[in-house]
């Protein structure tokens, strides 16, 4: 890959976990606001911090999705008929998605004003505490309807925190790396989601091996309580990294022009809404696929005859493979552009919706695993480039707010109500998969068309301060 015109390239060698990655950072001699990315050691810490923090946050957030599918209907909505209890459980799951855009607005505002790093520490702390408290929430048998109230409240807090976390993590990786490989660098943030899903599904799967009475009494709580340990690790790692150099340069320029009245970041985004709307609809299918597999897909597999432990462990294994697919998609987007990779993921998922549902409903553990593996691999084509794809549509002065709001609105549109919609469609068709497949195909079509309308941003100058 050649350097962008007018730039030179410095190679930074990055080692994250067991993977060795070469990140290339570019410096513009002609652009005074572009600061040189940090040295190799700093870049390692930033990318690893973004990846680990995202993995911890999504462990907490997606663990709830697994529990909503297989535990909460029994523990918190036991007095209802099976379908209603599942719908109520998925309704609490959606509450977190409703709160995510609000978290994106609030934390995005302060992230654009006082710094990305501070907001990342705050959001991680809030998420960890909320998840720990979910593990302590009494069941409906103990306190009646108040159990559901507490569960929903803590889920809203979770959504509020993750709504502000993603944008900051993506921007720290994006703004510390160079133009030639920033899609790959930012993909580590989204690789945290399947990592979190691996950890969450694996932990819930292991404890589901307990006798059923013990699992529903206390076993499901342990994965949530372990959030306290992950929180301590995550806060320590995030406290060691430096602030984004592009953000610091933008703040220095804003200080030099301090006589001008600063524009609210949210207003900067909303007064030109095209970027926000297109990124929201362009990314929405990625979350419909992600959440559909994590909730409906697992429930459907269990009801079709596969054992609960085999489904949970199979989904964990497929999610582990998806980590590398996400990183690979980020790399492809640096080479070929964000739009071609995103479009390919949406189109292929839509074309294979019926075969994937057939695999999940086969009742065979290996076929269910194959269905999750293929589904997550195709979803990764959309998910890998999203960090760079969305962030590149906004200027530095409002990038945290714009990226957070666009991403979180996409999660709400594509993922927030998908579990309940899919469960309702499935029940309304007496167990037929055609309505479910058609809904997912429709989501794929909307994103595929919208992506074609968005400008390509993989060579865009991130030092731009205004929209």
Image (cartoon, grey):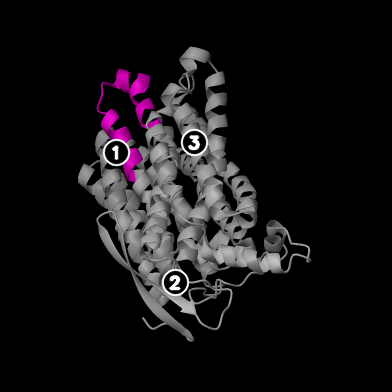
Element type at marker 2?
loop
Q: Image quadrant of residue 310?
A: top left
- Location of residue 212 with respect to 55 vertically, above or below: above
In the displayed structure, does residue 350 sit left or right of residue 146?
left
Q: Which mark is residue 202?
A: 1
In the displayed structure, does residue 128 sit left or right of residue 310?
right
Q: Image quadrant of residue 333?
A: bottom left
Q: CA distance from mark 3 to mark 1?
A: 21 Å
Comes first in the chain, label 1 or label 2: 2
Q: CA distance from mark 1 to mark 2?
A: 35 Å
Point out the image quarter for the N terminus.
bottom left
Asked whether disc 1 touches disc 2, contact meaning CB atoms under 8 Å apart, the reply is no
Within the magenta stretch, is there residue 50?
no
Name which residue lies at 64% across and 61% down: 398
Element type at marker 1?
helix
In the displayed structure, does residue 317 sit left or right of residue 264?
left
Q: CA distance from mark 3 to mark 2?
A: 41 Å
Note whether residue 216 is visible.
yes
Which residue is the site of mark 3?
90
3 vs 1, front mark: 1
Comes first in the chain, label 3 or label 2: 3
* Residue interval drawn in magenta: 198-224
Name which residue lies at 42% across and 23% down: 74
Q: Which mark is residue 178?
A: 2
User: How many residues crowd mark 2 within 10 Å: few (<14), some (14–19), many (20+)?
Assistant: many
């Amino acid at each position: 890959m050649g350097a962008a015109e007018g730039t030179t390239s410095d190679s930074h060698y990055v080692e994250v976990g067991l993977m060795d990655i070469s990140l290339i950072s570019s410096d513009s001699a002609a652009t005074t606001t572009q600061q040189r990315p940090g040295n190799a050691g700093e870049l390692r810490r930033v990318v690893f911090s973004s990846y680990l923090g995202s993995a911890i946050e999504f462990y907490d957030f997606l663990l709830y999705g697994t529990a909503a599918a297989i535990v909460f209907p029994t523990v918190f909505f036991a007095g209802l008929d099976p379908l209603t209890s599942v719908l109520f459980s998925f309704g609490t799951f959606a509450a977190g998605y409703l709160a995510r855009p609000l978290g994106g607005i609030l934390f995005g505002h302060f992230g654009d004003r006082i710094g990305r790093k501070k907001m990342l520490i705050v959001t991680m702390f809030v998420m960890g505490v909320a998840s720990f408290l979910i593990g302590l929430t009494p069941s409906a048998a103990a306190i009646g309807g108040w159990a559901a109230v507490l569960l929903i409240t803590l889920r809203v807090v979770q959504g509020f925190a993750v709504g502000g976390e993603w944008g900051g993590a993506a921007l720290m990786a994006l703004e510390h790396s160079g133009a030639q490989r920033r899609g790959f660098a930012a993909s580590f943030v989204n690789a945290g989601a399947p990592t979190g899903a691996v950890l969450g599904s694996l932990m819930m799967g292991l404890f589901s091996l307990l006798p059923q009475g013990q699992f529903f009494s206390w076993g499901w709580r342990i994965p949530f309580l372990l959030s306290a340990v992950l929180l301590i690790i995550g806060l320590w790692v995030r406290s060691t990294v430096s602030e984004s150099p592009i953000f610091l340069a933008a703040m220095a320029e804003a200080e030099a022009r301090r006589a001008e009245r600063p524009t609210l970041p949210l207003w900067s985004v909303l007064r030109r809404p095209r970027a926000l709307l297109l990124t929201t609809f362009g990314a929405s299918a990625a979350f419909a696929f992600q959440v559909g597999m994590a909730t409906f897909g697992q429930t459907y597999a269990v009801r079709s005859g596969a054992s609960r432990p085999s489904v949970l462990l199979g989904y964990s294994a497929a999610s582990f493979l998806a980590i590398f697919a996400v990183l690979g998609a980020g790399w492809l987007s640096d080479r070929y552009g964000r739009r071609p990779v995103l479009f390919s993921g949406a189109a292929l998922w839509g074309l294979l919706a019926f075969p994937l549902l057939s695999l999940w409903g086969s009742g065979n553990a290996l076929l269910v695993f194959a269905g999750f593996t293929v589904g997550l691999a195709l979803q990764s084509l959309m998910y890998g480039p999203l960090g760079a794809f969305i962030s590149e549509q906004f200027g530095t002065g409002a990038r945290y707010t714009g990226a957070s709001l666009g991403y979180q609105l996409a999660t709400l549109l594509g993922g927030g109500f998908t579990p309940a919609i899919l469960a309702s469609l499935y029940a309304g068709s007496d167990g037929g998969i055609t309505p479910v497949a058609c809904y997912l195909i429709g989501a794929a079509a909307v994103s595929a068309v919208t992506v074609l309308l968005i400008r390509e941003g993989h060579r865009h100058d991130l030092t731009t301060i205004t929209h």
